[in-house]
Amino acid sequence: MALNLVMLGPPGAGKGTQAKRLAEARGIPHISTGDMLRAAVAQGTELGRRAQAVMASGALVGDDIIIGLVRERLAKPDAAAGFVLDGFPRTVPQAEALDAVLAGKDPLVVVEVAAEDEELVRRLTSRRVCSACGANADVPAPGEPVPERCARCGGTLTQRADDREEVIRERLRVYARDTKPLVEYYGGRPTFRRVNGAQAPDAVAREIEAALASAAPQGGGGAA
């Protein structure tokens, strides 16, 4: 049975890292909306041209284009054995459209990587990038000092502008307003699982694998 997986979670929860890790381990594509947009624009597809025109105007790409890109991407042969969606759906209408795309296929498994806001703020404000080689430093554990020098090249580590506390808290407010309703949308399904994202990455990965083992055998179609 194909593993059709959506990863949900707020900024800083580590869902992107876990999505990539899981996709590589399972040999299925890790699909993000950003990757799809860039690929469609580069390939000059009809949806790509429409998306490029919208982005050039400074507007946000609408649901119709994003949903169309997802539909096209999931129809490709490498997604036949499953996929990991990261960054889609972001809204309930997008989730409803995804259900329609997957109607009659293997059930959709949804994993929420959850963590408290204060832990997310701590993680994101502690992130540093090397000004010399561009490497990302490991985020320190609670109570550990924030590193000042790059472990790879010794360069100075700096904080990204969007990792300031006020920016992070606004991103978390936007997530709660726009994306958290997805948890309510999916929460009653037998294939929905929540894992503790406040743990070390390896511990989160183990919890996700256990969650998938318990969720994947459930029956049903793309919409539960």
Image: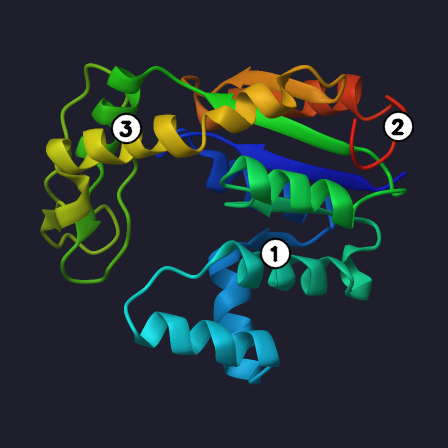
Look at the numbered disc 2 and give the secondary structure of its residue.
loop
Q: Eyeballing the image, is 138 above or below 187?
A: below
- Position in image of residue 79 (x %, y %): 77, 56
Q: What residue type is labelled 2?
A: Gly
Q: Which mark, by number, is residue 220?
A: 2
Q: Eyeballing the image, is 20 above or below 195?
A: below
Q: Quadrant of the N terminus?
A: top right
Look at the numbered disc 1 and give the secondary structure of its residue.
helix
- Does the image show residue 126? no
Indicate left or right for 168 with 94 as reference: left
Q: Which mark, by number, is residue 173?
A: 3
- Position in image of residue 171 (x %, y %): 27, 36
Using the numbered discs, state the Cα–Cα distance from disc 2 to disc 3 in whole angstroms. 34 Å
Q: Eyeballing the image, is 81 above or below 140?
A: below
Return the residue nearer the eye: 132 or 125: 125
Identify the residue under disc 1: 67
* Residue 46: quarter of image: bottom right
Return the residue nearer the eye: 70 or 94: 94
* Label whose residue precedes the other's in the sequence (2 or 1): 1
Q: Nearer the viewer, mark 2 or mark 1?
A: 1
> Residue at the location (46% across, 30% down)?
9
* Residue 96: quarter of image: top right
For disc 1, the neighbor class at 10 Å (few under 14, some 14 to 19, many from 20) is many
